[in-house]
Image: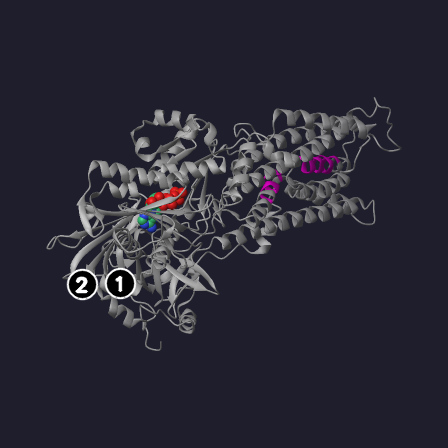
Amino acid sequence: MADAALFLVDAHARSADETCRAFAVDPGHGLAPGDALARAAAAGANVLASAPPVPAWRKFLAQFESPLVILLLVAGMISLAVWAIEREHQLPYESLTILAIVVANALLGFFQEARAEEAVASLRKMTAAQATVLRGGVRTIVPAADLVPGDIVILEEGVTIPADARLVESVSLQTAEAALTGESMPVAKDTAPVAADAAIGDRSNMVFAGTAVTYGHGVAVVTATGMRAEVGKIAGLLGETKAEQTPLQAQLDSVGKILGVVVIAIAVIVGATILVIQRDFSAAALVGILLYTVSLAVSAVPEGLAAVTTVVLSLGMQRMAKRNAVIRRLAAVETLGSATVICTDKTGTLTRNEMTVRALVTPSGRTDFTGSGYAPQGELLADGKPLGEGAQRSESDWALATALLVNNAHVVERDGRWTVLGDPTEGALKVAALKAGLTPAALERRLPRVGEVPFSSERKLMSTVHCDVTNGARTVLLGKGAPDVLLARCTNERVGREERPLTDARRGEILASIDALAGAALRTIGLASREIPEGAGPPGERDEREFTWLGVIGMIDPPRDEARPAVATAHDAGIRVVMITGDHPNAALAIARELGIVPGAAHSSGPAGEAVIGARLEKMTDAELADVAARTNVYARVSSEHKLRIVRALQSQGAIVAMTGDGVNDAPALKAADIGIAMGITGTDVSKDAADMILADDNFATIVAAIEEGRSIYANIQKFLRYLLSTNLGEVLVMFFGVVLAGVIGLVAGEGEAVILPLLATMILWINLVTDGLPALAVGVDPAEPALMRRAPRDPGTGVITRRMWWGIGVASVVMCIGTLL
Ligand code: ATP
């Protein structure tokens, strides 16, 4: 490492090899972990410098910023001055008490605020950026802050690029660089060197920190981290992110302000009344009244409403995080409570995302697979008997070889358990091929991969380019994807060892076999291959046609155990559950029925028992879609842009929509939804950035749990408001009527006193101190009531304090006032 570069500014003009050499790193192995640590010490953390945090003493002083508190302090000072002149008591008891209470109040506020900030900071840590790197030959996930120049980073669709890096390998890699260059279209990336003076936007072999991979995958060597990265040059100092106000906080702020004005008016009236009754205009008496009036105002003005709400919301956020729902925007907590529709993905969210191939249908018949999970142990059966030699064997071998080659997953055994690294669908295909006795190494030697057109949810298809070394180095394109989509691109089929043209009748039969597999709730994948004519140039997306159909695979992905009860809870709570999936409509419906999202088979005649497919949705106008969306619970074969339209259609009908998503292209739908929910495990960075909430466990049941928490938090805030407002109002009423009605209710002032004060200034302040802040917290952590999830969602149009609550508050405060005065 001694002679390794610390960073490079001209990596784009060098070759990939040269760049790796400059950093003394082998791109196939990565840095040794110890070496990475040493480089980290020299290069510093991969973070943008941020403005220094506000020191604690400034935060404490900020507690005294309220004009009322300043007024109280001023009044206390005047009282101190009067004491100094008149010396009636040995010590200025009143001013000292006031000072002590004001300080105690500030401390309380300070610690509450710190606690809320802590909660938010720990959540931020949970959602901190990560990067996949190759270190010591092993793929590892490290915090993005730990990246060093020379690190080999693995880039996949949807990742946010963690540092500036020079590409070493690119498979159709495209990135979105709008944040850096303003270029709104994705930019294609490759590994060829460019001119040394190329502008940032033209450095097509570089990827830049803060931009994101939108398509394809690649490998790159980090050339600059932290403030040395291009984004560091334009970002300058990263300011403290200003906390936005949630709608609830804004509402409470304005309620607080109105109440403040009312209370101050009452306090002034009380003060004036005392003055009129007392008719003592000496300095001491005037200061006494001033102190009294200000204390009353300070105690009764609910200035802490928004602050307490923040604490309750952030404590709630922490509780939700324990249940695997990580909130990224405070406002989502309250919106969750009013959600009326949950739009959810199927794979991995409602199902376990643990795939096992059950069947392969090729032109000569159906082959079944035994065994479970990812262990490559099991048998291939035809009609219940081991699959023998013959046409079906030959077809299944070629189909499974294709499944194994058009595949980026790895199946590994760890501590006696077989697991998949990569896409579970591909892992399952690999396991099936292994069960058939195919050997990956031999196949890869015979058909080395020379190119790839990656999978995307939009295309629902992927293919790889191979050189068939045993067949005169012919170029072969192997494809796999949604079977209906792939079949439409096929012109032939492979029967035995022969290729035959696909007749319409055969096409119909194949479609029927796909429907049958999907109808049994199996996820289906079609397989096809094609020989590329010589001299046609390097194969790409445009060659994904005129395929030869090989067969269709059906795999199970069992529903999660907790999904069915969670759907039932959502329905009880008046929330509709809508499944939006890229999968086949029959498979989607079968799972939806199993989970109770649509009525069971017996009454599936209604429109709710139908699936609307993407192609049909595309032809609908927005108005038609809004109409259909009102009664459709299953959408199949849809892609991300359909998700956006579905959200808008539901919203146009007044629904509050929670929408899940994981891909790059789901980001607009997640942003448009009232609550965008990203997947913590399988989700891309891009989708997480766009979301309001992240499911740490990708589980549908967690959404329902989060809604329950959201409702409970809202209910607790209402409880607290009811408590605070009725006691404060009671207090003001006692003071007002106590002074005004003293004579009427038969109270006589003592010797030397002109008026009766129900409570002294210091008493009021003390009551305020012990009754306002802490009970709020107690109420804030109240457990959820069981009835909460049997109610309809809250109408977001009604204020946090409903008309009924106002009545309750009014009655309670009048009762308290009468009781106290009596
Ligand atoms: P959900 O939207 O619920 O997550 P999904 O995972 O089925 O469902 P997509 O990932 O968009 O949605 O997949 C759509 C279809 O594409 C699948 O039904 C399958 O037939 C096919 N498919 C999925 N993964 C692959 C893959 N790695 N290679 C080829 N085809 C795939």
Badge 2 density bin: few <14, some 14–19, many ≥20, Cα 10 Å: few
173 above or below 611?
below
Q: How busy is the neighbourhood of tag 1: few (under 14 within 10 Å), some, or many (20 plus)?
A: some
Front position in the image: 682 or 779:
682
Q: Which residues are magenta?
A: 289-311
Q: Amino acid at mark 2?
A: Thr
Residue 299 covered by magenta stretch = yes
Front-most of residues 386 and 217: 386
Q: Main secondary structure of the magenta part?
A: helix
Q: Quadrant of residue 450?
A: bottom left
Is the shortest distance between ligand 1 and the CB of mark 1 under 8 Å? Answer: no
Q: Quadrant of the N terminus?
A: bottom left
- Residue 577 point in image, percent of width and height: 48, 35
Q: Residue at x 76, y 41 (%)?
A: 762
- Residue 139 pos. (x, y %): 39, 64
> Image quadrant for the C terminus?
top right
What amino acid type is highlighted by mark number 1?
Glu
Q: Position of residue 133 (x, y in %)?
A: 38, 63
Q: Residue furthest top?
A: 744
N-term-proximal mark, 2 vs 1 = 1
Specify whether 188 is left or right of 64. left
Which residue is labeled 2 in the image? 470
Tell me the residue that label 1 is attached to.
Answer: 444
